[in-house]
Image (cartoon, grey):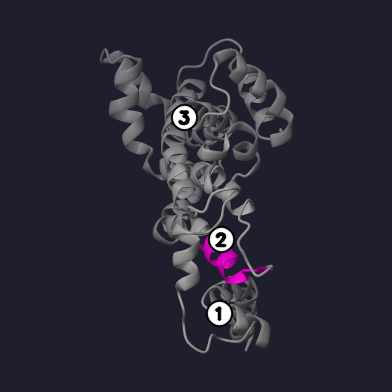
Amino acid sequence: MKRLMIYLLLIIAALFFLLPLYVMLATSCKTMPEIYSQGILALPSHWNFDAWQHAWSAATIGAGSQGIHPFFFNSFELVIPAVIISTAIGAINGYILTHWRFRGANLVFYLLLLGTVFPFQIILLPMAWVQGKLHIAGTLIPGLVMVHVIYGLAFTTLFFRNYYVSIPHDLVRAAQVDGAGFFRIFWRIILPLSTPIIMVTAIWQFTMIWNNFLFGVVFTNSDQQPVTVAINDLVDTVTSVHMWNVDMAAALIAAAPTLLVYVLAGKYFVRGLTNGAIKG
């Protein structure tokens, strides 16, 4: 009976969190008359994907009617280099802070920890000033990529540092005795052991960067905005009636990559956490 109650509570919790997704999916596949004549929980009388096609290629974003697909690809152009760079630098930082300690290493680590509690808003003005001095203001690459890399370094360093603490230092010492240097030890010993934490960090950064709205709206121009900003600028109407099915379809398209990442790699995320990503 106790086990049955646990499963029942888990099912109720799952349905509660899946309800918004169901409403969005059902609404995106209805026509506008159906949306106004039926309740939000009603299934479509027939599944119509015209709103999805319209959102992808013809929806009005700001002053243009090109759909969200250019901005969708903008997000990929942003997230791929930002994730790779921030993960790589975080791995090296974590390696240095655990196995190549130097005077003041603890201070550096605590300062990096402060970066994990800074809100997005606190870095807007300093980052805008830096981008102006570098003449990269308003650009997706390298401007917005740089913003996400710098902001994400505190998190990626923390993840890798806490994971590398669990790797015996004797491995590094033995390699040093055999004549291996800094980068050889990193490539041949540390990195092969880092697959779980690399997955954790990559998934974390991908999700944070893809879903971010504030940096995109502040640091890019209209034609280089990521998809999260494009959805906010979606203004499609028909005879002064807002097209809710198009809105829902656009939101689901924008959310699809992060959902897909968690579906395909969620088990690696959990495995990485249990293997030391939150240890230390």
Horizontal arrangement in the rendering, residue 37 relative to residue 152 (left or right) = right
Residue 65, x across and y down, in percent: 51, 54
Name the main secondary structure of what is drawn in magenta: helix
Question: What kind of element bears circle 2?
Answer: helix
Mark 1–mark 3 Cα distance, whole angstroms, equals 39 Å
Residue 124, x across and y down, in percent: 69, 28
Residue 178: name its quadrant.
top left
In the image shown, does 107 or 247 lie closer to the viewer?
Answer: 247
Q: Point out which mark residue 241 bears.
A: none
Q: Name the residue under label 1.
A: 31
Q: Which of marks 1 and 2 is in front?
A: 1
Q: What stretch is highlighted in magenta?
A: 241-252
Q: Earlier in the sequence, mark 1 or mark 2?
A: 1
| Amino acid carrying mark 3 in the image | Ile
- Mark 3 crowd level (few <14, some 14–19, many ≥20, 10 Å Cα): some
Q: Name the residue under label 2.
A: 251
Q: Which quadrant: the C terminus?
A: top right
